[in-house]
Image: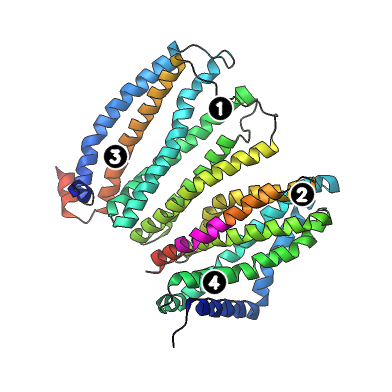
């Protein structure tokens, strides 16, 4: 029963699996994102309050979800690597961090672009945007800690520990930012409450979220291949894999 | 000769304190930095005491965070450089006791000193004297928590040549809840509202980090020392 788990410790096996999975993820992501974009940008009705500006939600919300999802993925991989001493876990964590950071940046940029017509300013200290910004700082910390060590194995383990510490702190940071906001801000910025969405708007959003998740899987597989090749560059199977 | 954990804790704390007091200039530098940073804000902003009073809790807390970070870099560094830390790790007490003792001693000479100086800075920023108790309590809880978060960061960066900037990069995002609740407690006390809620949050964060951070900091040191 546990053999599949032990196989995950073998670099050639993981490399082959990632190579086999990547095109599937990419194809399915293209279908889901394609449907979501067409249905969301063309067929979904404009919002009664925000007009067509709300359509940025189809990029903003999935990337915000994925920014957290990728962080949790990174932390779980780091925990597996630390607990069972599986080196491939570090490779997954290292491959996941830049992707998650990019989703975080995308969520921040689309959020502030959305803020321009809605709030009249590119940046309001909205609690969700602020905790997204702090999440970006956490990603940057993990990535720079990994690259700061000359010994890559040590850098991997240090970054893994920091990812776990960050995972414990993410909910604390989020709720304290929400609390801070309710204390300072009052009614200066019209917050959109969370209106229950009409199904014609919701379906494209869910499809986009699924598509983003598959896209994350595809990019993760591709980055993981590069990461494994770089880490195992002394091994013979790598030379054979590159030649063929 | 065998020593129990409590005795080892006391011995390490005493050693740390003695080492710090042999170097009084290093002890004073973070405090002077704290005073200088708080002087910068009125110079850069405005002389109006009413405006200053609105900004004061934030200014005080940002300055306290930055000056605590300055001294965190040296928490394990000198002992790691001359091999003392390895000897302490091998002494049979378990590294956690050593880490707890070192961090606690560090808080005594940096955090507690900041708390004691804060009324001077508070007066200069126009914080009324009736608020000092709340301000000092919040700073005490906050700097203790920060020392623990910093111990994790210092443990992770101890082997690095230029770990100082990286240490700030790692610790500051984790410390943001402290800033929020600490400044809120002082702010509420100034405007005459009960600060109990924010203080309870700070205390909860403090207990939480005091419980978990020693193990994380020990694990970090194990990673970097090996």
Q: Nearer the viewer, mark 3 or mark 4?
A: 4
Q: Dot 1 corresponds to which residue? A: A113
Is residue B160 rendered to the left or right of residue B122? left
Which chain is mark 2 on? B
Labels 1 and 3 in the same subunit: yes
Q: Residue at x 46, y 26 (%)?
A: A59
Q: Residue at x 33, y 56 (%)?
A: A83
Across and down, in percent, residue B80 comes to 47, 73
The chosen color scheme is: rainbow
Q: Residue at x 20, y 49 (%)?
A: A2
* Label drawn at residue A221: 3
Across and down, in percent, residue B166 comes to 51, 57
Q: Residue at x 49, y 37 (%)?
A: A105
Q: Are marks 4 and 2 in contact (CB under 8 Å)?
A: no
Task: Using the numbered discs, state the Cα–Cα distance from disc 2 to disc 1 in whole angstroms.
Answer: 37 Å
Q: Secondary structure at mark 1?
A: helix
Task: Using the numbered discs, state the Cα–Cα distance from disc 3 to disc 2 in whole angstroms.
Answer: 53 Å
Q: Dot 4 corresponds to which residue? A: B102
Is residue A135 rendered to the left or right of residue A228? right
* Label drawn at residue B189: 2
């Amino acid at each position: 029963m546990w053999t599949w788990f032990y196989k995950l410790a073998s670099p050639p096996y993981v490399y082959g699996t990632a190579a086999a999975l990547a095109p599937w993820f990419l194809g399915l992501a293209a279908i889901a994102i394609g449907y979501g974009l067409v249905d969301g940008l063309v067929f979904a009705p404009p919002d009664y309050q925000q007009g067509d500006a709300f359509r940025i939600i189809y990029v903003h919300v999935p990337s915000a979800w994925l920014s957290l999802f990728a962080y949790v993925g990174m932390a779980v991989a780091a925990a597996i690597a630390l607990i069972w001493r599986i080196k491939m876990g570090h490779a997954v964590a290292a491959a996941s961090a830049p992707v998650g950071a990019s989703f975080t940046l995308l969520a921040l940029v689309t959020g502030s672009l959305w803020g321009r017509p809605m709030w009249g300013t590119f940046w309001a200290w909205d609690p969700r945007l602020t905790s997204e910004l702090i999440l970006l700082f956490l990603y940057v910390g993990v990535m720079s800690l990994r690259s700061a060590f000359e010994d890559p194995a040590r850098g991997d383990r240090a970054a893994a520990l920091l990812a776990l510490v960050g995972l414990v702190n993410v909910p604390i940071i989020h709720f304290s930012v929400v609390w801070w906001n309710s204390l300072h801000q009052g009614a200066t910025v019209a917050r959109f409450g969370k209106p229950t969405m009409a199904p014609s708007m919701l379906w494209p959003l869910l499809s986009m979220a699924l598509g983003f998740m598959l896209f994350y899987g595809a990019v993760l597989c591709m980055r993981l291949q590069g990461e494994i090749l770089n880490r195992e560059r002394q091994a013979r199977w790598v030379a054979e894999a590159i030649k063929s | 000769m065998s020593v129990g954990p409590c005795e080892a804790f006391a011995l390490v704390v005493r050693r740390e304190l003695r080492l710090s007091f042999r170097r009084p200039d290093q002890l004073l530098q973070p405090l002077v930095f704290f005073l200088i940073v708080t002087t910068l804000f009125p110079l850069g902003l405005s002389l109006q005491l009413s405006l200053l009073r609105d900004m004061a809790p934030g200014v005080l807390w940002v300055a306290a965070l930055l000056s605590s970070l300055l001294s965190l870099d040296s928490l394990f560094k000198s002992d790691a450089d001359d091999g003392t830390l390895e000897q302490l790790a091998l002494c049979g007490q378990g590294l956690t006791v050593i880490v707890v003792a070192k961090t606690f001693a560090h808080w005594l000479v940096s955090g507690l000193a900041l708390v004691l100086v804060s009324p001077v800075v508070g007066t200069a920023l126009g914080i009324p004297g009736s608020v000092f108790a709340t301000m000092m309590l919040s700073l005490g809880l906050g700097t203790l928590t920060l020392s623990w978060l910093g111990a994790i960061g210092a443990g992770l960066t101890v082997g690095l040549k230029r770990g100082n900037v990286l240490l700030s990069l790692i610790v500051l995002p984790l410390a943001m809840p402290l800033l929020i609740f600490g400044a809120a407690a002082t702010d509420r006390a100034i405007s005459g509202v009960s600060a109990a809620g924010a203080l309870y949050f700070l205390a909860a964060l403090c207990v939480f980090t005091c419980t978990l951070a020693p193990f994380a900091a020990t694990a970090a040191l194990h990673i970097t020392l090996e």
